[in-house]
Image (cartoon, rainbow, N blue to C red):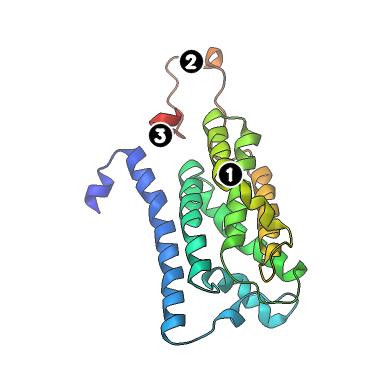
Amino acid sequence: MKQLKDLPAKKKRFIYSLLFPAFFILILWLVWFVETELSLDFSAWGIFPRRISGLRGIVFSPFIHANIRHLANNSLPLFFLMSGTLYFYREIGYKVFFYLWLIGGILVWIGARDAYHIGASGIIYGMVAFLFFSGIIRNHIPLIAISLLVVFLYGSMIWGVFPLVEKMSWESHLMGAMTGVALAFAYRHEGPQKPPPFWETEEDEPKDEYDFPDFLS
């Protein structure tokens, strides 16, 4: 731990942005392992809309996946998007993550069809929407670069908000994306901002605390 504290601030920030996503995804895999090894079925702990017992799914549904393919498909984008959100939006990253989890889940409980809705894909869609729209709204080149990267990697996910695949919770995707857009607007004045033009900046003004990796500077 002392070695981590002695690292330069930028490297320390990068490492910290990886730790929570890695821990969160580890829990997802542990839940799936327990469910599989003990021949259990946790799907009843998912969100069941407009049913009182389904409210618990708002908290527990992201931990539950239908099968290993479902979990594997969510793990990599979840890690990448969570890390990006926590690194580039460190002041608000955790709030964005937990609001996506909570608000997205509430919207699914209110408006989705009668079925158990499980998985973390709603959070994934929320972070895609947040990263994309937040970069565009702030009009800051490094953040716009992140927006374009997100579109390049996950742009095809747009089809997931439509009821095209049977037994897929497209409502979770749609509600997550809507929440991500709303949070991008709600937090547009918090976190990293576009710096003022160079002619308005004093020569001795301290460096922007929201510095980015060298290749994005």
Which quadrant of the structure image shows residue 165? bottom right
Q: Residue at x 60, y 37 (%)?
A: 135
For marks 1 and 3, give the CA distance: 17 Å
Depth order, front residue of 130/201: 130
206 versus 81 height, above or below: above
Give the quarter of the figure containing the C terminus: top left
Amino acid on which disc 2 is placed: Glu
Q: Pinpoint residue 149: horizontal percent, then vertical percent.
A: 53, 39
The location of residue 156, given as percent across then percent down, is 62, 49
SS state under label 3: loop
Residue drawn at (46%, 55%), measured in percent from left and top?
79
Q: In this rendered view, identify the residue nearer to me: 142 or 65.
A: 65
Secondary structure under the numbered disc 2 in the rendered image? loop
Percent of width and height locating residue 92: 54, 47
Q: Are marks 1 and 3 in contact (CB under 8 Å)?
A: no
Q: Position of residue 151 (x, y in %)?
A: 59, 42
Q: Dot 2, crowdedness within 10 Å: few (<14), some or many (≥20)?
A: few
**Label 2 or label 1, whichever comes before in sequence order:** 1
Q: Residue placed farthest to the top in the image? A: 199
Q: Answer yes or no: do the residues labelled 2 and 1 have beta carbons within 8 Å? A: no
Of 161 and 25, the residue lying toward us: 161
Q: Amino acid at mark 1?
A: Leu
The first of marks 1 and 3 along the sequence is 1
Please name which of the two marks, 2 or 1, marks the residue nearer to the observer. Answer: 1
Residue 206 sits above or below residue 169 on the image = above
Which residue has dot 1 on it?
131
In the image, what residue occupies the spot 41% across and 30% down? 215
Q: Residues within 10 Å of mark 3 (few under 14, many from 20)?
A: few
Residue 202 badge = 2
- Quarter of the rendering containing residue 105: bottom right
Judging by the rendered image, the residue that carries numbered circle 3 is 213
Label whose residue precedes the other's in the sequence (2 or 3): 2
